[in-house]
Image (spheres, helix red, strand yellow):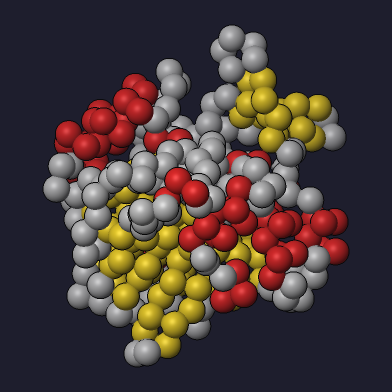
Amino acid sequence: MSEQVTLPPVDTIDVTILVDNSVDVLLPGNEMVQRAPLAINWTEREQLIAEHGYALLLTVVRNGWRASLLYDAGLGRSTLLHNMDVLEVRPADLRAIVLSHGHADHHGGLEGVVRRLGKRGLPLLLHPDAWRYRRIVFPTGTEIHMPPPSQADLDREGVTIIEERGPSLLLDGTVLVTGQVERVTDFEKGFPLQQARTDHGWEPDIWVWDDQAIVCHLKNRGLVVLSSCSHAGVINILQHARRLTGIETVYAFVGGLHLSGAVFEPIIPRTIAELQAIGPSVIVPGHCTGWRATHELARALPAAYIQTSVGTTLHFA
């Protein structure tokens, strides 16, 4: 078990959804939920792209000091940069990149964004297992391969690769990366369909130990937790964040819960019951959560639920 981390409170947290599985330009916004702007000539503009991938821009402000990092990079080589251009997000403002895990739908745009930055020495934080070459074998026999990021390409672009299994602090200590998440629940069993290629051939790799989340402490509110896929289990992740920080209140969760498909749908009721007990004020499920789980979450947590969409900025204050 990791030692407790001191996570200072920040004044505001902005989370912009740069890549996700859906985009809806007609969703209403409010003071907290800022949707991508529409204009009279919107049909003549470049449009935001949705895909099976995920990427978030995180910006924290503390005592007038402001800093940003990128959490994942989507699947397509150009999707992230395209959406950043449409939203007029400037990658030069980034101080670091965090990779949630090594699956291809989270690192596809890495090379493009670091090349655009042109900044030698940009930190890229990941778990060592993110370099594993994996495949997903479905009950039907269909398989999809998940190549890891190209370390050679990243080295060529001058990225500073930081491998950590344990927790790390970024952006002057205001952002916690959980590192490897402790598994304590009896129903979140990793990714049973996954295998990794080793020197001995394909072997089961169900626990996805490289799965890591991001945690911030919002002043007078509690924890804001970002988790792209939650292969460790969303309840494990939230409990781990509480243990690491010593802060019990989870104010917001943004990310994927990986409850899509026949393997994971049976744990939807238990997951929702545990989430109701934790009681986040805001939940923004996206990416791999799945349509059934998303609808159940909206029904079970109506006051907290916010519909995801590419281009949305969540302003927590």
For image coordinates 17% across by 36% down, the residue present is 300
For image coordinates 44% across by 82% down, the residue present is 66
Where residue 88 appears, as percent x and y from the top left, is 51, 65
The relative height of residue 140 versus residue 296 in the rendered view (above or below) is: above
For image coordinates 75% across by 26% down, the residue present is 202
Q: Nearer the viewer, residue 17 or 34?
A: 34
Where residue 206 appears, as percent x and y from the top left, is 57, 32
**Tally of marks:** 0
Whether residue 230 appears in this view of the structure is: no
For image coordinates 48% across by 60% down, the residue present is 87
Q: Nearer the viewer, residue 308 or 34?
A: 34
| 303 displayed left or right of 2 | left
Whether residue 290 appears in this view of the structure is: yes
Where residue 147 appears, as percent x and y from the top left, is 73, 39
| 235 displayed left or right of 143 | left
Q: Nearer the viewer, residue 89 or 64?
A: 89
Question: In the picture, which quadrant includes the C terminus?
Answer: bottom left
Where residue 268 appears, as percent x and y from the top left, is 31, 29
Q: Farthest top residue? A: 140
Q: Farthest left residue? A: 303
State which quadrant residue 10 falls in.
bottom left
| 179 displayed left or right of 119 | left
The relative height of residue 115 versus residue 210 in the rendered view (above or below) is: below
The relative height of residue 182 versus residue 179 in the rendered view (above or below) is: above
